[in-house]
Structures are given as C-alpha cells and as structure tokens.
Image (tube, rainbow, N blue to C red):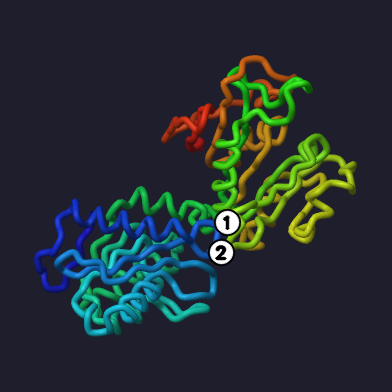
Amino acid sequence: MRTLLNRQEKLPFSEKDQEHFMQLALLEGRKGLGLTSPNPPVGAVIVDNDGTILGRGFHSKAGTAHAEVKAINDAYEKLGPDRIRGANIFVTLEPCSTQGKTPPCCDAIIRSGIRRVFVGAIDPNPAHAGAAVSILNEAGVDVVTGILEDDAEYLIRFFRRRMETGRPYIIAKTAMTLDGRTTLPPERGQWISSLESRDDVQHLRRQCDAIMVGGETVRTDDPMLTLRGKYAEGREQPERIVVTAVKNLPLSAKLFNDAHADRTHVYHGQPLERVLDDLGKRGICSVLMESGGSLFSHAIGRKLIDEVVFYMAPIIGGGSNTVMPINGIMADIEDLNVEMIGPDIRVTGRIVK
C-alpha cells in the first residue's frame, strides 16, 4: 500500500477499515461486469471521516458517467454538495485523467472538494498509468493506492488483457464426468451438469462479451448460447462466435435463425490467434469458450486460455468424447478454487503462462 499525502495528515481509517470500504466499492464494480466493454468495470463509494457512507456508484455502460461521478451525484442527490467536502472516495481503479466520451473523473473529484482518494488498481493503460495520482496530489487531494489490489486487478482482468495484448481474456468452461468425459451415452440425455451448474453458467455468460464454440458443438448440440431469464435483463445478448475448420455448418442451427442471429459470427479456417486479434479490435474484452474437445485442447496448447471453469458431475463413465482428446498437451493451474454447485463440483483457476 502506498500513501501520497500532501499535508502528511493521519488517515481517518485503519487499514482494516480501508479494506472494508474498498470491498464495498468492489461490490459496486461487479455490478458492471459484462456491461462496460471496451471500458473496465469500476465501483466507487464515498465515505465521511466518521465512516458514514455518503454515495455509491458503478460504471454501467461505455459512454455514460463513470463510477466516481455516479457516486458523487448519488451523494449530491441525497445530501447536497456541501456534505461531501472533505470526505473520502474509495474507487477500485485509478480515476481517469483525460477527456474521452465523458469528462475526466479527476476534475469531478477536485471540484467536489473530496479530500482523499483511496485506489485499488492503477490504470493498466501506459498512457494513463499514475497520471491521476499526480494530478490529484498536485491539486491538494491526498491519494492512497494499492488497497485490496489483487481483488481490484481481478475485477479488471478482462480490460487489462485486451489493453496489454490487444486480445480478449479467455475463460474456458466445460462440463464433464468424474472420469473426464464430456458426453453421455444417448440414453442418458444431453446434460451432464445439474440445473444449479447451468444457472451458474448463465451468471458466467452475463459477465462476458462473447461466447465461443467450435463447429462440432454447433453440429452436435445446436446450442442457443443466450442469456435467459433474469440474466438477460439490462444488457445485450453476448456475441456468439463459431470457430470451424470446415464449412458444413447446418443452416437450420438456432444460432443462425433466432432473434439474435445478427450477433452470430463464423470464423472459418482461421488461426485462433487471428480470431482473437479480430475480436479485440472490435472491442470485445472477454470470451467464454464453451467447448471441450479439439478447440479447448488447441487453445490450451497455444497458451491462449487465461482461466478455466470445470463443472464435474457425480458420474463415472460417459460417452466417447473427452475434455482433452489430444495427447501431450498440459497446463498448470494456479489460484485454484473448488466449490460445490448443487451436486456438482466446480473447479476454477487461472492458467500459468
């Protein structure tokens, strides 16, 4: 944690309190997951020196007000502008310092009279990194950085990946039996995972800009790849990406004939790296790859996957397909998390690159 104090005053909050208020800002920021691309999700909370919450806000869509401005406006509407003078703002990402579709948040913070800014992560854009810290400090606003930095970085991991590589962040999701099979015998039906796991997948889809499958998944499963029910509220359907080596995709597939057919894009015979480059140029920051088999193996082997989510059903012995049909490909996983989702085991982790 780094503290930049103009007047070397004692901070009004302990480190534990600072982390508590940053957790509240992170909760705000998570509300924007899946809504803000190509911008990052950001949350902000304004706190009086006695710990009273004065305003909250999160960035909800590119081109609209940022989290800091939302929190300031929230406080103004409830309490009036004088109430936040001398207060503190906790924001998950360094405030923007340049004019874009909206004015710089640094200016709004300075005008508001906020006394201190507590920051989670520094802006990964090298043109902006640290700029707001300097601008605010020069204007007499104290800045504290690095509060719950790992959590704040995780919130913007999609944005950071595209900023650093030009490509979206890839989450690979698949359902399997305990012995690694991704299909069941025909008499057992289509679904390996439980209703609870499939609901969890909807939550995961909502966070991502696009869903990717291989051509074989389209031919075999005829998926819809849509958000449904409460998960579809307040946002557009994700882009649907089909990567295929051969052209014989069925024209009758739901992806080409439903109300969202214009959001289906087919990449035929192109290297996956080129596909990801194109998606990044289109402002897509995150892709949920819902595929086992050759596409998953190929992406793992070329170190293109950032994170995995496996739903393991309490079943031994499935169909003929396996999650890794290509021999000799392996990857190490870090930050492993194991959790029960209904009767299934959900395993998540990040690929070591």
Where the N terminus falls, by quadrant?
bottom left
Amino acid type indicated by mark 1: Cys
Q: What element does badge 1 sit on?
A: loop
Q: Is residue 73 above or below residue 37?
A: below
From the image, tell me which residue sits under label 2: 38
> In which quarter of the view is residue 330 placed?
top right
Residue sitting at 60 percent across and 39 percent down?
Answer: 198
Comparing 318 with 187, the one in front is 187
Crowding around mark 2 (Cα neighbors within 10 Å: few <14, some 14 to 19, many 20+) is: many
Most distant residue in the top direction: 317
Q: What element does badge 2 sit on?
A: loop
Q: Earlier in the sequence, mark 1 or mark 2?
A: 2
Residue 196 horizontal/vertical position (percent):
55, 36
Crowding around mark 1 (Cα neighbors within 10 Å: few <14, some 14 to 19, many 20+) is: many
* Labels 1 and 2 touching (C-beta < 8 A): yes
Amino acid type indicated by mark 2: Pro
Q: Is residue 316 above or below residue 151?
A: above
Residue sitting at 77 percent across and 21 percent down?
Answer: 187
> In which quarter of the view is residue 109 placed?
bottom left
Residue 172 horizontal/vertical position (percent):
60, 39
Residue sitting at 74 percent across and 59 percent down?
Answer: 263
Indicate left or right for 10 with 203 as reference: left
From the image, tell me which residue sits under label 1: 285
Residue 353 disc label = none
Residue 305 horizontal/vertical position (percent):
58, 40
